[in-house]
Image (spheres, rainbow, N blue to C red):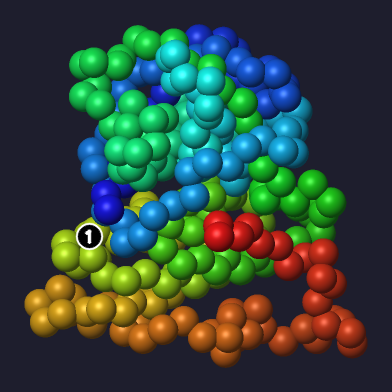
């Protein structure tokens, strides 16, 4: 099923602590970008059970469409800085096509039909970067592991690291079934590659693909591996813990389940 990126522009200040309160906030819908493809359904009905007092990289947005009391939970793929831009603030949402899901179906309408509409939103989610319990100054490197649409919150996190210029080594292990469009259809791959190519992220990207057909990958690219992601790949990315005799603190291993 396809996925689109929806862009919404707040009509209130997003700087500081103005948006991420437990209260529901008004925004104005502005535009939507081109379609992207994905291979499985995303989790679109989450609720803000752990609301925070600011928008953090990795959170989702509970979105209330007009005349519908039930929200749709969509991952924020933009960065906090983009939301706080004084000239043109925006929030980017990854929205799976789902006709039976009213909020998703509403966002999939023609832009001309919904531009300017007023929405109600609420930020939620505790899977964020930097983690609330750990200072970013105490982090030397980070390993992001994702499969399919699980890349969505990590895109916001990686973008945040790139924009803030954190002195971190970033390793990305990304598993995806290759869509019909080939590598061009892999969610956010082009954006992530650009961060590494332009040295906004320092580290390594590895894409693990399955379902490859003849002609889908024209050349053997060094960051593409035509096999499944394994535990050994994760161990290699994490590396040896020479400064620890007990292994990694479990509080430094974070995940978000979508099932």
Q: Percent position (x, y) of residue 39?
A: 31, 61
Question: Considering the image in quadrants, where does the C terminus appear?
Answer: bottom right
Give the residue furthest to the left. 215
The total number of labels drawn is 1
Choose top left, top right, bottom left or bottom right for residue 221: bottom left
Of the pair 73 and 238, the residue shown nearer to us: 73
Please name the residue shown 18% across and 76% down the image.
217
User: Vertically, is 168 above or below 42?
Assistant: below
Q: Percent position (x, y) of residue 6?
A: 36, 32
Left of 234 or right of it: where is 204? left
User: Vertically, is 154 above or below 172?
Assistant: above
Of the pair 87 and 148, the residue shown nearer to us: 148
Please name the residue shown 37% across and 69% down the image.
176
Please name the residue that numbered disc 1 is placed on. Answer: 184
Alpha-carbon neighbours of circle 1 within 10 Å: few (<14), some, or many (≥20)?
some
Q: Percent position (x, y) of residue 254?
A: 70, 62
Please name the residue shown 74% across and 39% down the image.
50
User: Vertically, is 83 above or below 158?
Assistant: above
Of the pair 61 and 68, the residue shown nearer to us: 68
Q: Percent position (x, y) of residue 252?
A: 77, 65
Residue 204 visible in the displayed image: no
Choose top left, top right, bottom left or bottom right for residue 22: top right
């Amino acid at each position: 099923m396809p996925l689109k990126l929806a862009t919404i522009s707040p009509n209130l200040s997003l700087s500081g602590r103005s948006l991420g309160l437990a209260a529901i906030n008004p925004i104005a819908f502005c535009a939507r970008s081109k379609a992207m493809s994905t291979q499985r359904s995303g989790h679109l009905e989450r609720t803000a059970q752990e609301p925070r007092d600011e928008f953090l990289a990795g959170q989702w947005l509970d979105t209330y469409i007009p005349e519908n009391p039930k929200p749709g939970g969509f991952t924020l793929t933009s960065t906090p800085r983009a939301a706080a831009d004084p000239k043109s603030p925006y929030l980017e949402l990854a929205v799976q096509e789902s006709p039976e899901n009213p909020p998703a179906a509403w966002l999939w309408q023609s832009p001309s039909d919904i531009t300017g509409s007023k929405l109600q939103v609420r930020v939620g989610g505790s899977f964020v970067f930097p983690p609330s319990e750990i200072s970013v100054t105490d982090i030397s490197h980070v390993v992001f592991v994702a499969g399919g649409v699980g890349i969505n919150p990590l895109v916001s996190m990686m973008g945040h690291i790139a924009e803030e210029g954190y002195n971190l080594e970033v390793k990305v292990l990304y598993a995806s079934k290759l869509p019909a469009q080939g590598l061009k259809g892999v969610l956010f791959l082009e954006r992530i590659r650009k961060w590494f190519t332009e040295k906004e992220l320092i580290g390594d990207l590895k894409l693990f693909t399955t379902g490859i057909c003849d002609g889908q990958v024209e050349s053997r690219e060094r960051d593409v591996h035509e096999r499944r992601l394994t535990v050994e790949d994760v161990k290699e990315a994490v590396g040896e813990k020479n400064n620890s005799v007990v292994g990694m603190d479990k509080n430094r291993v974070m995940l978000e389940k979508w099932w």
